[in-house]
Image: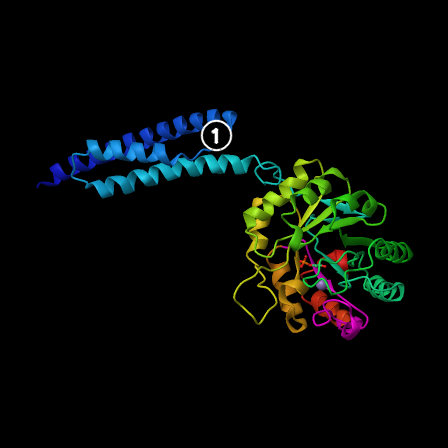
Amino acid sequence: MSEHELDGLRRKLDEINLQLLQLLNRRATLVQEIGEIKKKQGINKFDPEREQDMLNQLVKQNQGPFDDQTVRYLFKQIFKASLDLQIDEQKKTLLVSRKEQAENTVINLGGTHIGNGTPHVIAGPCSVESEEQVFAVARALKEQGLTLMRGGAFKPRTSPYDFQGLGEEGLKILRRAADEFGLQVISEIVNPADMEMAERYVDVIQIGARNMQNFELLKAAGSVRTPVLLKRGLSATIEEFLFAAEYIVSRGNSQVMLCERGIRTYEKWTRNTLDISAVPILKNESHLPVFVDITHSTGRRDILLPCAKAALAAGADGIMLEVHPNPAVALSDAKQQIDIPSFETFMKDLRASNLLGNGNL
Ligand code: PEP
Ligand code: MN
C-alpha cells in the first residue's frame, strides 16, 4: 500500500470519527429530551427492558466485522454514558452542590465565621455530665481563644444500659457555660420534636452519625433557622451524605456544616477509618463548610495531632475533638477524650504547624 493510499484511508477514518461524534451527541440530546419527559411523568430514567430491546435489534442487524458480543459491549457503553449524563444533570440541581452555588457558604457563629478559609476548632466533652465539668472545659477553651464548644445532652448510645445524657438539663448547663465564657454551643438533637426546644439553648444543632439518614429528623432540622452540623453516617457514602444535607437545605435551612467522622471498615486499630479523601471531595462537590471529627474517627488520643494536621492540610474548615477534665471517669467515650493539659499541648502543637491561620491565635 502506498503512502498516498494510507493517508486517504486515515482521512476517511477521521471523517467517520467526526460523524460518530456528531451522532453520539445527537443521540445524547435525544436521551436528555426523553429524560425530561420521564422526569415530568415521574418515571425511572433507567429502563432495562428498553435497553435489552435496543441491543437485540442491533445484534439482529449486525453484519460484522464486529461480533455480536462486541456490538453489545460497545452500545452498552454508549447507553451508560447517556444515563450518566442524566445523573450528572440531577446532581447539578442539588442545592448543596458547587454547581448550584460556586462561592463557599460562610456561617456566622457569634462573629466566628465558618467556611471563609480560616479553620476553627470545636472542642468539648463527649457528654454533658455536670455544671462543674462543663465550666472547666469552657474555661480551658476560653484560655485557648476558642469560641466553639461541643457537648452531648442527648446521647445515642449503642447499649440502652449506658448513660443516655442529661437531656434538656444538659442543654441548660451548656448555655450557662457558653454565656459565662462567651462561647457558642453545639449539641446533638435526636428527636424531631425537640428541635424548637433546642433552639432556645444551642447555637448549632448537631445531627449525629447514627441519625444521618433519619429523614424526619433532617426535615425537622431544615424547618428551624439554627445552623446544623451534620455528621457522616457510620457507613454512608459521600453521595448519601450530601443527599442528607440536601434534606435540610431543601427545607429552607441553608446553614449546614458537614462533618467527616470516620466510616466503618475492617480496620480494628482505629475506632473508625478516617476518610481524609472525603474532605477535598466534599469541598469540590459542595459549597458547605467541612469539619473533621478527629476523636470519633480515630478513637485514639495518640494520633489526634497528625490526623488534625491531615484534615486541615486537606482543606477542612475545622476540626472537632473531645476534651474532658477527667476522662478516666467520663460517662461516655472515656478511652478517647483528652484531658485539659493534653488539650493545651495539642493546641500549641497544632498552632505550631501553621495550619490554623490567624483566627485561632
Ligand atoms: C458525638 O459527636 O457526640 C457523637 C456521638 O459522634 P458520632 O455521631 O459521629 O458517632
Ligand atoms: Mn463521644
For badge 1, the amino acid type reads Ile
In magenta, the rendered stretch is 316-342
Which quadrant does the C terminus fall into?
A: bottom right
Q: Quadrant of residue 354?
A: bottom right
Along the line of sight, the residue nearer the viewer: 180 or 22: 180
Queried on whether the Cβ of the residue with tag 1 lies below 8 angstroms from ligand 1, the answer reads: no
Residue hosting label 1: 43
| Colour style of the rendered protein structure | rainbow
Q: Quadrant of residue 27?
A: top left
Give x and y (percent) for residue 34: 43, 26
Q: Is residue 233 above or below residue 215?
A: below
Which quadrant does the N terminus fall into?
A: top left
Q: Is residue 338 left or right of residue 209?
A: right
Q: Is residue 50 above or below residue 189?
A: above
Is 326 inside the magenta-drawn segment?
A: yes
**Which residue is rendered at x = 72% and y = 68% of the image?**
333
**Which residue is rendered at x = 39% and y = 38% of the image?**
81
Along the line of sight, the residue nearer the viewer: 187 or 148: 187
Is 46 inside the magenta-drawn segment?
A: no
Q: Quadrant of ligand 2?
A: bottom right
Give x and y (percent) for residue 114: 72, 49
Give x and y (percent) for residue 78: 34, 37
**Which residue is rendered at x = 28% and y = 30% of the image?**
19
